[in-house]
Image (cartoon, coloured by chain):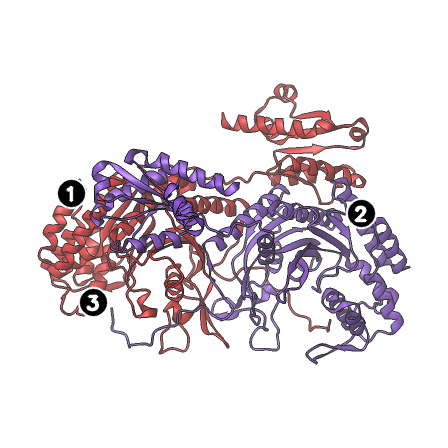
Chain colours: A red, B purple
């Protein structure tokens, strides 16, 4: 090895906006994703895992005028591949995969994808630059049965991971209905689709912010514009009062039953062809779902759902959790959206020139995990191992023999491998490991052929609550013959589990 | 939306050296990793998931003289984090995590990590720039009990995923023994460890290539150098014949029993202190493993194992699969190494200045999967869904009701969502989906309250083998009352499974 110039020590930190996940954080997420995958699988969706790196061209984020791809993605240049970037979602890679492999894939192609995505955005509290997404999409069918299916699957998924019925609602709408309303309001001209596109973009984003801005805020954005609390001014769509009335009427079109909502929407879209098409699709989705037993207690038509993304072309859907949690200011508020999606018919076309209809959803993995945590549905305490302590360094082989026996019986177990000199440190270690039981065998015990089994959970309880008498009368440590080690540990673990359940 | 300049269509390809994984490929890997994680968990190892992106400084790949980090990693510069890179292994991030969080982590810290790593290397057949690693490490203990534990765990892991005992061997060696031999050979001076470092590097890499180069090739590299088949010349370490004899003797030191091998190594290291230390460690590892029942049929001492990485400082280990497979030229050869690791005591020190002993292993996930595939231990055919065909577009709700019933009974099922006009296409689709059963209900059947259940597996068998009489006498399609759909599908699936097992 060549001698190297002495360098300052590197800093042991992650890059800005990235973090590490430890133990129970990793397994809780994994458990949830496993359960979701089971539902997706049952619905006939197949797994797809694309690589983290895509060409910037395929991701569709390349701006030809600038030296560097636009902000929002992590991108860099490679000699043999040009500009490449980390994927920022699962949909863009799916479009690339379908375009690339369409002759080898079944059509329609139902696929799910789970994994990290990366966003080069300003990190903030709870906002990281790498986070998980969990998507399911059906590519290659224009049938709204595919949209209905995704909504049903979303409902099943939420219940399977632990959100009880009544604590969530999947809301469905249709962009075509909104376009019909825009046509009626005079901001969409079917003979010139590009006209008013800018205004419609503002309307879309305004409606999407209804829960944050309220009716007045949205109305301001439909008209001249809006100044927010910080004084920033957002220019509005410039709609007249009458035009804004039409749009506001759409957002307010939800009625007590799906049939009534559909009837109201039909009024609102009037003669608009695209609007009528959208209403008919909503009606069909509702009847398909009803046939499978999904009523408005699980999935309902709600015209206020529009989804922010510009690429949706038909049905859009969103899962909202309806139970209350405390926000950062201690106020009760609805938990809010954890998943959403919709139909997008033009993403594959970018590659092939051929329109390929597709629909799909994305679950916000971290949001859903947070919800399950808030509902007490996730066990964040890691199951600790039985810790075999080391009283006599020279007898390490004996201790290793004990853990091997315990493991062979399926019990999570480990030997203390730190410096065994200070026994207190060993118990502190067991505590930090959340160990339910410690095993102790000194020279005397070894000679007598016995071993001490210490119930650390009972011990902790006694230390917290008990009087001196109780302390003495409830020994948390028992001495048993060495050859009964496994059986006694099993019995103690069972007792602890039974205690925890009652 | 603003009008955009018309661009050429993007190419639907991955960047060079990357690929997609579909269906069964994803689930086979996942199943294997799940089983491995179960073993790691039972041994007391906790999951850790670090982000894909690390600072180049933390990864330790930054060369101060060049503008750009060295080749081998995917790296780019961020305004707020400086040079960052995709992790190229799991060990460097672990060292960073332990340095960063050492006050909150138990010591010793046993952790496992599974996930993709990225290498900016020349891709080739079967060599990709993103691939999975699956590591387990114990940080914060110098005890060789930790090394023994990893070897035992590696053995358990291989058997758990499906490599039977006898088809693998975990081989253990110790760098200190090699250093002792180097001392005896006169290429290591304990009073000046940097002296001959270059020569020792060549020796190390030469020994590591024993199985590829053979004894003569290694010997040439220990001496003047070696010209390979393509004519490329590799300069050797420049050892004299006598020096090379000592090193070659080390590689050849394996005897029939561990005790004999240890005795031979003890002779070889002579008076070298580090060499004697290494031999004693090997002896201790063997006795610890024997106490847990791991004999030389699973784990053995083998001096020819050295591992290529420069950072190992003590015990090194490697799992080799001993069964034969055909290589690309059709020759039988041993499958070879699927996992390895060793003790590295200086990685955390880079950050903190304090030496933190550590040991760990990495499993080559793709290699192990390939091995399981070669042994027929992996099911690469995806369990296909029951496909409900669409005879009548207007009755989509009925068909959706059928799949809902099937799914609620836990059966993987889907409705055909493509254009239903051509029924042949629906059966082709079912075939491509590997569907075991197709459900058919036309208008007449609906009226009569019945449904057709088509056994696609039996159908395929008959089509392949049967005479016309057999074809007629073994109907692969049955008609059942609609309300028996689920029960009859369950029965047919069970029959197919029973058939497959016999």
**Residue mark closest to the camera, 1 vs 3:** 1
- Residue A405 location in percent, x, y? 69, 35
Which residue, given by chain and number where applicable, does mark 1 sit on? A259
* Chain letter of the residue beneath label 1 in the structure image: A
Say left or right for A327 vs A316: right
- Residue A73 location in percent, x, y? 42, 66
- Residue B256 seen in this snapshot: yes
Rounded to the nearest angstrom, the CA distance separating label 1 from label 2 is 78 Å
Q: Tell me the element at label 2.
A: helix
Mark 1 or mark 3, which has the lower sequence index?
3
**Residue mark closest to the camera, 2 vs 3:** 2
Which residue, given by chain and number where applicable, does mark 3 sit on? A197
Residue at 16% x, 55% y is A277
Residue A65 found in image quarter: bottom left
Residue B249 found in image quarter: bottom right
- Residue A369 seen in this snapshot: no
Q: Tell me the element at label 3.
A: helix
* Chain letter of the residue beneath label 3 in the structure image: A
Relative depth, front residue between B51 and A268 = A268
Residue B321 found in image quarter: bottom right
Vertical relation: B496 (above or below) A125: above
Q: Are marks 2 and 3 in contact (CB under 8 Å)?
A: no
Report the disc number at residue B284: 2
């Amino acid at each position: 090895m060549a001698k190297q110039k002495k360098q300052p020590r590197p800093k042991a930190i992650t890059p800005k906006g990235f973090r590490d996940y430890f133990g129970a954080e990793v397994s809780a997420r994994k458990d949830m994703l496993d359960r979701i995958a089971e539902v997706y699988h049952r619905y006939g969706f197949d797994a797809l895992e694309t690589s983290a790196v895509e060409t910037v061209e395929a991701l569709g984020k390349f701006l030809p005028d600038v030296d560097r791809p636009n902000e929002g993605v992590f991108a860099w240049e490679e000699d043999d591949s040009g500009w490449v970037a980390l994927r920022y979602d699962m949909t863009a890679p799916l479009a690339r995969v379908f375009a690339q492999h369409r002759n080898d894939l079944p059509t329609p192609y139902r696929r799910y994808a789970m994994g990290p995505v990366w966003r080069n955005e300003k990190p903030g509290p709870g906002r990281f630059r790498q986070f998980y997404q969990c998507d399911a999409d059906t590519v290659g069918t224009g049938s709204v049965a595919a949209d209905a299916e995704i909504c049903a699957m979303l409902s099943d998924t939420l219940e399977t991971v632990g959100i009880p019925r009544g604590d969530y609602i999947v809301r469905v709408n249709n962009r075509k209905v909104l376009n019909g309303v825009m046509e009626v309001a005079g901001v969409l001209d079917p003979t010139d689709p590009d006209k008013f596109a800018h205004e419609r973009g503002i309307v879309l984003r305004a409606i999407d912010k209804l829960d944050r801005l309220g009716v007045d805020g949205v109305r301001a954005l439909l008209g001249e514009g809006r100044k927010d609390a910080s004084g920033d001014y957002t220019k509005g769509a410039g709609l007249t009062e009458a035009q804004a009335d039409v749009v506001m009427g759409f957002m307010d079109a939800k009625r007590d039953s799906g049939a009534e909502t559909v009837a109201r929407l039909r009024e609102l879209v009037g003669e608009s062809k695209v609007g009528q098409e959208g209403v008919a699709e909503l009606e069909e989705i509702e009847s398909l779902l009803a046939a499978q037993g999904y009523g408005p207690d699980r999935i309902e038509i709600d015209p206020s759902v529009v989804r922010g993304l510009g690429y949706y072309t038909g049905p859009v859907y969103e899962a909202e959790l309806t139970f209350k949690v405390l926000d950062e200011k201690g106020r009760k508020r609805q938990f809010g959206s954890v998943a959403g999606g919709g139909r997008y018919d033009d993403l594959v076309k970018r590659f092939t020139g051929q329109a390929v209809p597709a629909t799909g959803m994305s679950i916000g993995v971290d949001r859903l995990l947070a919800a399950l945590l808030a509902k007490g549905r996730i066990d964040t305490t890691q199951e600790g191992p039985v810790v075999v302590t080391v009283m006599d360094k020279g007898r390490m082989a004996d201790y290793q023999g004990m853990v091997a026996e315990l493991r062979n019986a399926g019990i999570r177990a480990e030997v203390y491998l730190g410096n065994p000199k200070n026994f207190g440190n060993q118990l502190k270690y067991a505590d930090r490991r959340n160990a339910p039981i410690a095993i102790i065998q000194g020279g005397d015990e070894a000679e007598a052929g016995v071993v001490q089994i210490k119930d650390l959970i009972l011990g902790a309880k006694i230390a917290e609550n008990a009087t001196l008498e109780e302390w003495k009368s409830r020994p948390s440590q028992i001495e048993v013959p060495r050859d009964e080690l496994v059986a006694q540990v099993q019995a103690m673990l069972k007792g602890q589990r039974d205690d925890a359940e009652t």
